[in-house]
Amino acid sequence: MDTSKEILEKALEFEKRKNPGFINYLLNKSNSSDEIKSFGLYVIKKTESIKLATIDSEFQNDIIKKVFKDRELFQNNLRNKWGHCFDLSTILRVSVSSLTDKHIKYVEKCYSKNELPEKENTWICLKYLLGRAIQVYAEIMCLVENGFPDAALARWRTLYELTCSAEFINNNGEQVAKAFKEYDNRNSNYEWANKAKCFAGQDFVSFHSIEKQCDFSKSGWNKVKKLAHLPIHVGANGTFSRAGLEKNKPIPIGPVESGIAFPATQAAYMLGIISTIFFSSFVNIDSAINSYLIYDLVEMTVNKYYQVFETQTSDISK
């Protein structure tokens, strides 16, 4: 990487080729034959004047007003198109949170003397994993509702890992749950999983190994996971083919209206799956009703996104 001095020297060479009269003007003005010193003084003065203009309170207020105005206009346009979908996503999140809270109270009241102690570590892990999943889902929808689908899809990757971990812990018993709860990540994030019989004797366990043990991950989620990798890692696809790319902008940054449905629907599905895993840890009429209700809410939410997406695609093609 070039230092400031090297950049200054290269800039001087460029100006000497393109505008030699300007350099002569600087030398005459400073009464000096030192080109780099005269050019450096000019750059410093110019920088100071721009900095002073930038920190001017009136100038700052104008920028902030424009940013807020543009943001409000963008969000109003986005909500006009996707508002009903966003509302259903919120209802899904609040419903999962509310049903989870009620189920926890129900289980800890009804099972406290008998079955709960036998699955205490599993229960604690699933509660915390689902709680974190609900939080991540809220973060995903915050990004979606503000026009950042790439970031939302990157955050979905965490939701997917939480769901895989929840199923693996739920299927492999107390020893694995205890290891997860007490693990401090000194060596790898998944070493706790070697307490499971399927990894007996293995020093290193990867997330991919855990993923292969999960039933839900075998149902086509690998394609979504690969797409979610793109905005996380530096690569050509994630750089040149992201949802936030708008060709008419000098720098392709800022919120966009495209790519909204995909991260929102995939997040809804994943929240539904991890919720079902949680409710299946203690099966009773309460957990059965909760699972069916959340399934219906997920389907309703996803279908609405697809319906709006198809309507907008149809409008564009006309």
Image (cartoon, grey):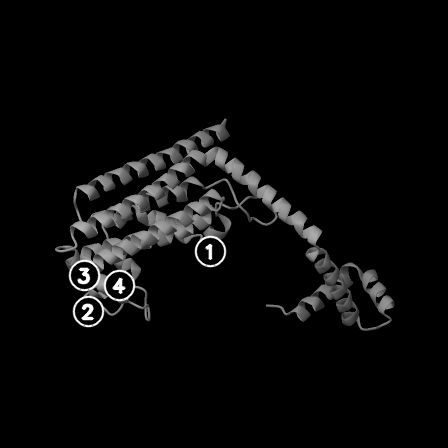
The first of marks 1 and 2 along the sequence is 2
- Considering the numbered disc 4 on the image, is that residue within a helix, a strand or a loop? helix
Of circles 1 and 2, the one toward us is: 2
Of circles 3 and 2, the one toward us is: 3
The first of marks 3 and 2 along the sequence is 3
Q: Single out the residue that lies furthest toward the left.
A: 114
Task: Name the residue tied to disc 3.
Answer: 174
Q: What is the x, y in percent for residue 283?
A: 17, 46
The first of marks 1 and 3 along the sequence is 3
Query: Crowding at label 2, few (<14), some or many (≥20) Cα neighbours within 10 Å?
Result: few
Relative to 173, residue 292 above or below? above
Distance from Cα at disc 1 to Cα at disc 4: 33 Å
Query: Crowding at label 4, few (<14), some or many (≥20) Cα neighbours within 10 Å?
Result: many
Q: What amino acid is at disc 4?
A: Phe
Task: Name the residue tied to disc 1.
Answer: 235
Task: Name the residue tied to disc 2.
Answer: 201
Distance from Cα at disc 1 to Cα at disc 2: 36 Å
Query: Crowding at label 3, few (<14), some or many (≥20) Cα neighbours within 10 Å?
Result: many
The first of marks 3 and 4 along the sequence is 3
Numbered label attached to residue 247: none
The first of marks 4 and 2 along the sequence is 4
Tags 4 and 2 touching, CB below 8 Å: no
Q: What amino acid is at disc 1?
A: Gly
Numbered label attached to residue 180: 4
Residue found 45% across the figure and 42% down from its top: 259
Q: What amino acid is at disc 2?
A: Gly
Tags 1 and 3 touching, CB below 8 Å: no
Q: Single out the residue that lies furthest toward the top.
A: 318
Tags 1 and 4 touching, CB below 8 Å: no
Q: What is the x, y in percent for residue 147?
A: 49, 44
